[in-house]
Image (tube, grey):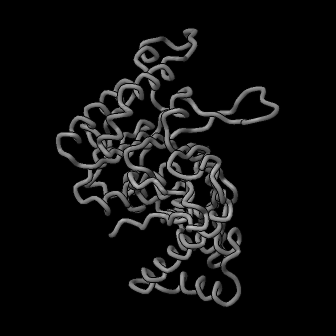
């Protein structure tokens, strides 16, 4: 698989000003969803830190699994590290979604490896960065999830002991200060998965947050919040069942593209992100770029074709999304510089 083309730069009429993915030194891992790639600025940035935040069942782990699958296809010698701390990982389901389990390092005991504390993960990450530097190989490192990690001090305390609970936030800040430059030098894509928490007593502003303090807010290059919008159902033989969910993704921070861009995609159970359908929905509803007979034909072909025909259709729609995204974004690029 050839690495997905970079998002095009702004046309010359924009004066060569800043535009998504204009940074030539950044490479990306496809997310598995073309529109989400556009929102991210090209995909998950390599050599950077990303944070996927969301409530239950919005596809946080699935996004990580699809990143693993795409990274494995791009980098035959790349190394994948998946640190699962929730003790709830379904390896069979992950394989069905495309996780290349033979290429994934889950830890010394495989999927049964225990990752209980932040200290363990940071030490493992430090060792991993050292090994990658020696091997001169790119890597993808996923922590699923940050919220399930405790600290040694917390593990040693008895239940009910009063505490300010600041150990994790302090260690996150210390860990990033020590390793953030090594992550860049090792060409490692580091992805943290976080669960949302409700803020108590909030009347206005952000109603949700996530654990780990402010360190991720400062050191992450991409922060994506996932939200459940709608449950989709199908009926077969008179029986109706939920089969998919519509998810909204908003990039609240982006240092490799334009921030605060958002999109919607369909997450189908047992399959993953419906890239083609999600792309067609975006082209029709958000970009207003497709309508009428062409749209109907593309939707029909997306359901009917398979094999080479489907691959060609996917490539055509992907290129249509990239071209249209650039055209839309170019309308909002300043046409002059503040300082000449």
Residue 226 visible to the viewer: no
Which quadrant of the figure contains the N terminus?
A: bottom left
Q: Position of residue 267 (x, y in %)?
A: 56, 62
- Write the residue at 34% across / 33% down: 114
Q: Nearer the viewer, residue 61 or 308?
A: 308
Image quadrant of residue 282?
bottom right
Q: Position of residue 330 (x, y in %)?
A: 63, 64
Residue 301 visible to the viewer: yes
Please determine whether, in this image, residue 294 is positioned above or below residue 68: below
- Write the residue at 60% across / 72% down: 324
Please determine whether, in this image, residue 92 is positioned above or below residue 166: below
Q: Nearer the viewer, residue 103 or 29?
A: 29
Image quadrant of residue 302?
bottom right
- Write the residue at 40% across / 17% down: 152
- In the picture, measured across the screen, residue 151 lies left or right of residue 111, that is right
- Write the residue at 61% across / 63% down: 14
Q: Position of residue 322 (x, y in %)?
A: 53, 70
């Amino acid at each position: 698989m050839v690495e997905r083309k970079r998002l095009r730069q702004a046309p010359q009429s924009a004066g060569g000003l800043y535009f998504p993915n204009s940074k030539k030194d950044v490479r990306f891992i496809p997310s598995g969803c073309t529109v989400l790639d556009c929102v991210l600025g090209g995909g998950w940035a390599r050599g950077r830190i990303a944070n996927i935040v969301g409530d239950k069942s919005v596809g946080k782990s699935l996004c990580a699994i699809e990143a693993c699958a795409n990274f494995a296809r791009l980098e035959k010698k790349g190394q994948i590290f998946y640190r699962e701390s929730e003790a709830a990982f379904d390896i069979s389901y992950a394989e069905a979604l495309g996780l290349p389990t033979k290429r994934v390092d889950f830890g010394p005991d495989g999927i049964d490896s225990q990752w209980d504390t932040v200290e363990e993960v940071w030490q493992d990450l430090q060792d991993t960065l050292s090994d990658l530097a020696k091997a001169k190989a790119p890597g993808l490192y996923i922590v699923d999830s940050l919220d399930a990690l405790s600290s040694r001090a917390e593990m040693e305390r008895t239940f009910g002991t009063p505490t300010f609970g600041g150990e994790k936030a302090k260690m996150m800040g210390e860990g990033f200060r020590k390793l953030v430059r090594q992550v860049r030098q090792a060409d490692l894509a580091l992805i943290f998965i976080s669960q949302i928490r409700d803020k108590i007593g909030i009347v206005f502003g952000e109603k949700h947050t996530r654990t780990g303090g402010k360190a991720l807010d400062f050191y992450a290059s991409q922060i994506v919040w996932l939200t459940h919008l709608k449950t989709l159902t199908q009926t077969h033989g008179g029986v109706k069942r939920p089969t998919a969910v519509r998810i909204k993704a908003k990039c609240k921070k982006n240092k490799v593209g334009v921030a605060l861009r958002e999109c919607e995609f369909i997450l189908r159970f047992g399959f993953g992100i419906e890239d083609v359908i999600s792309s067609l929905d975006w082209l029709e509803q958000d970009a207003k770029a497709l309508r009428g007979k062409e749209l109907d034909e593309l939707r029909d072909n997306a359901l009917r074709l398979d094999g080479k025909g489907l691959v060609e259709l996917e490539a055509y729609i992907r290129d249509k999304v990239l071209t249209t995204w650039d055209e839309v974004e170019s309308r909002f690029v300043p046409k002059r510089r503040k300082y000449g």
